[in-house]
Amino acid sequence: METNGTILSVKDLKTYFQTEDGVVKAVDGISFELKKGETIGIVGESGSGKSVTNLSIMRLIPEPPGKIVNGDIIFNGIDICKLSIEDVRKIRGKRIAMIFQDPMTSLNPFLKISTQLMEVTQLHLGHTKEQAYQHAIKMLKTVGIPDAESRINGYPHEFSGGMRQRVMIAMALSCQPELLIADEPTTALDVTIQAQILELIKNLKAEFGASVILITHDLGVVAGMSEKIIVMYAGKVFETAPTAELFATPANPYTKGLLKSVPDPAHEAGTELYQIPGLPPDVAHLPPGCPFAERCERVREICVQEFPPFVQINENHYSLCHFAKEVYAESVAERENKNER
Amino acid sequence: MAETNGNNLISLQNLKVHFDLGGGGILDKITGGSKVRRVVKAVDGVSLDIKKGETLGLVGESGCGKSTLGKAILRLTEPTDGQVFYQGKDLAHLSQNQMREERKNLQMIFQDPYASLNPRMTVGQIIGEPIRTFSLENGGNVEEIVKDLMETVGMSRRFIKRYPHEFSGGQRQRIGIARALAVEPEFIVADEPISALDVSIQAQIMNLMEKLQAEKHLTYLFISHDLRAVRHLSDRVAVMYLGKIVELADGKEVYSDPLMPYTKALISAVPVPDPEIEAKRTRIILTGDVPSPINPPAGCNFHTRCPYAIEDCKRQEPQLAETKPNHFAACIRINSEFPYIEENEKNGLGAVGN
């Protein structure tokens, strides 16, 4: 296919919701590309549009009130936005799979694990019952569920949170998808279990060669998992860069603020934590200027009046800010100071 | 009997909270119920001192009993056994009426700011309720006090007539904090106060809690599974596993020099927002889940997941002992002479008896 190693390309995606409060521009002009075998991290606070972006890719936006009003989502040369729902269903679950945040609400409590796992391959791969059953056991073993032969006949409530998330991953990977979307896959889990699940996703990615979109609010999670990162705020991409560069030299005040406001156990504590003032904005009533302006510590007149440009910093590093270059220069200087010390 | 001495505000002695699930009776045999009596030992013999003015962090995985411990101190869950000393009184054995009076000094902030505020009450009513309940002020003054409280927690005084649904999660948590402060307590149990909030808001709430502590000389029991937050806020940290405290030390030391294999695993599991550190560090990944507290493993609770477990760990129950100065740990493979389990393992040392 004519994809040059690019598995997914999203161009100027806009997903709006019609509400009583007016039009909510949940996702407003997002573009990114994902290469085969690559992991991209999407970071943002609640309401930033990160989940809606991914529901759009899966065409899972409830319509109405939601609608993809603009943009192309090209998956392996196919424009997902133009497909009929029947054709989307053939891709969804088979070539693009998704893991959700809460494994308890995304598994059916009334059905055995086996039924839920077998359904996927019977539908997409045309497995017979016996084949599907054996395949399901194999998948449960792959994701590290001990005693898979007997656990497969259990119900979701008999599994712990971490084990349920493993079942979800087994289900998602059943058909060897080319793209795995993990929406806050570890948010509901304990740190020790989170470490297990992240390690599992990493290993499976290597084994199956799938590309991954990892959505999270936790900068720590993406730091160790992804090659590049998109920072979202109020439905917009605020910054995108290769992971190491984004953490070392952020070029957006919001990214900088986020990075500073996470207490870091590896470093000395005791001093007051940096805080971003104010609240995330109401996406139904966005100001004409920069949506982050009222919380930004370096806000100027222009920020309130004009929407900021998407400035290119380096080859793959962009930042949505009037002062992106200055912020970047500051970060570079801070970095050098730190390294000298 | 140990009383609260000058430095300790709260002193827990062998506190236990057990939940009886039934089973093992004659009827159970007929109806096919559990053959043995099943008891969840949510908190199982915790002795702990909370010093005046400090923040004691309590960390552990879900289901380890940390929330139950916090609630048991305030008698929101009845303790099964043990004592909770506060100002020379044993809270665990007060009558309900006496305990109510004590709640003027002991308050709680809850995890879920959506569920812990009555949706049919205005902010003014919510924050003012404890003041009215304890008749601390007469009617007319309450509104002024509530407004002052709102200002203290960083909310506009104008919002007094609004309802909880009109606020974001972070704002609601501020309301919860203002309510806890309304009776001017000495001690606050903060049960996962930031877990449900966005990252940028978490920092705001943590800073607010620190500011209030300095202004009002509060003592906190800060319960969280977020080790980064605990490290940031706490003077001392207690690590809990399956109903027991397994390590207790200064906040700094728990992170820089953890002694228990469990604590080490917990710390190494925390993702660090720095790709360079992430790439370099080695993770200790624990296998398996937390065992069920219904049938906790014999001996050391952690032996089923511990990479250093030996035969003795399955039989011998470790006691919390001072392994280094002011650093307590509960493991039979380490003691004050040999505090480092990796070295003991290398040198072929088995149980050294703590």
Image (cartoon, rainbow, N blue to C red):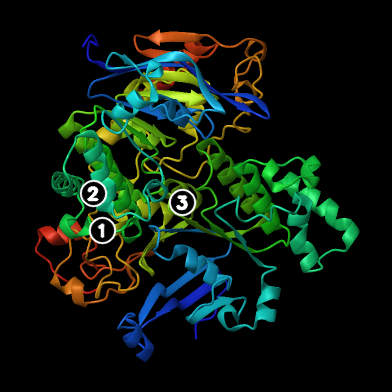
Secondary structure under tag 2 reads: loop
Q: Position of residue B32 (x, y in %)?
A: 32, 81
Q: Position of residue A287 (x, y in %)?
A: 66, 19
Quadrant housing residue A47: top right
Specify the subunit that label 2 lies on: B
In this rendering, position of residue A149 left or right of residue A172: left
Q: Which residue is mark 3?
A: B230
Q: Which residue is mark 2?
A: B284
Q: Position of residue B224 (x, y in %)?
A: 46, 54
Q: Report the residue at 56% width, 11% height from top.
A: A308
In this rendering, position of residue A66 left or right of residue A33: right
Secondary structure under tag 3 reads: helix
Residue at the right extreme?
B140
Which callout, 2 or 3, points at the residue further toward the start of the chain? 3
Q: Position of residue B170 (x, y in %)?
A: 61, 43
Q: Nearer the viewer, mark 2 or mark 3?
A: 2
Which callout, 1 or 2, points at the residue further toward the start of the chain? 1
In this rendering, position of residue A34 left or right of residue B14: left
Which callout, 3 or 1, points at the residue further toward the start of the chain? 3
Crowding at dot 2, Cα within 10 Å, few <14 / some 14-19 / many 20+, comes out as some
Specify the subunit that label 3 lies on: B
Of residues A312 and A185, the one nearer the viewer is A185
Q: Which residue is mark 1?
A: B261
